[in-house]
Image (cartoon, grey):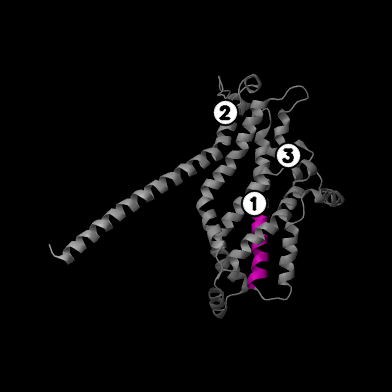
Amino acid sequence: MSKVAYEKQTHSTLSASYKTSNTFGKKIGYGILYFILGIIAIIQIYPLIWLFLFSLKTNQEVFGMSPFSLPQHPQWGNYLKAWTAGHIDAYFLNSVIYTVIAVVLTVILASFVTFAITRMQWKLSGLVLGLFMAGYMIPLHSTLIPLFNTFKSVHLIDNPISVILSYVAFNLPITIMILSGFYKSLPREVEEAAVIDGCSIHRIFFQITLPMTVPVLSTTVIINMIYNWNEFVFVNTFLSSDKWKTITVGVNNFVGQYLTDWGAIGATLMISIIPVLIAFFVLSDRIVEGIAAGSVKG
């Protein structure tokens, strides 16, 4: 065998050995990574599993057994009790109505504001954006008394409109902040071409810009939905009638002076989580796409 042929064979053998070891190393690395991610996933999912098992227990099992024990006789009646005796059906419907209306209003108004600030040229656009961002830094609890006095003066206490307006006002800053990063990355050439073709500003927004922002809108929808659905302070402060309350406040129905039905409370909490989980699974791809798109500038 010639020297050249020997060197080629040696080089091929070393290359094959390196590729084999490199592939084996990658498999070990991916295996460790998947193992760590699996542990993290279990840690994240376990509270939901624990809450589900908790909702199937009686008070005796809650206090007389280990918190991590399985229910001896699953009490599926806790869900029926929560839905009927606890009036969770009405509270659930109220939560859906308030959340949907507030999310729609917030997303539409935030899209208007973001379009005007980022795509239109006017002197006070920076100041207006700064005012909205300043609103994001205002603590919620510091506004309760002023808001209560304001709503009382216009006769909106014990009226769902007060809660919806509060949701919209407090969600606008974060929604505008998320949308502005995405709007700045949109190419202006599309809008300039539309203007040349005689398209009005309203048609540019509704037919061109708004459809291009669907991914990031999905992100804002799920963020707003989670906040509105889980909100407790505004509902508990502004609404006193039982018929207007939401599911987060309705949990108190099972807290009595002498006895608390913990199984029914767990069932209520489990019911309240389901819509958020469904919305997240349905919009998960859009959420990831919107977050990635909003992080790219240029």
Left of 198 or right of it: where is 146? right
Left of 132 or right of it: where is 289? left
Residue wearing tag 2: 53
Q: Quadrant of the N terminus?
A: bottom left
Q: Name which residue lies at 18% across and 62% down.
A: 6
Residue 97, which numbered label? none
- Dot 2 lies on which element? helix
Whether residues under marks 1 and 3 lie with C-beta atoms below 8 angstroms apart, the answer is no
Task: Nearest to the eye among marks 1 and 3: give it.
Answer: 1
- Dot 3 lies on which element? loop
Dominant secondary structure of the residues highlighted in magenta in the image: helix
Left of 3 or right of it: where is 266? right
Of residues 126 and 121, the one nearer the viewer is: 126
Q: Residue furthest front?
A: 3
Q: CA distance from mark 1 to mark 2?
A: 29 Å
- Percent x, y of residue 115: 64, 68
Residue type of the residue flagged with mark 1 = Asn
Q: Name which residue lies at 57% across and 78% down.
A: 195
Task: Provide the residue span drawn in magenta.
Answer: 104-119
Residue wearing tag 3: 245
| Dot placed on the residue nearer the N-terminal end, 1 or 2 | 2
- Percent x, y of residue 95: 67, 42
Residue type of the residue flagged with mark 3 = Lys
Q: Is residue 165 above or below residue 68?
A: below
| Res. 55 visible in picture | no
Residue 224, which numbered label? 1
Q: Name which residue lies at 55% across and 80% down.
A: 196
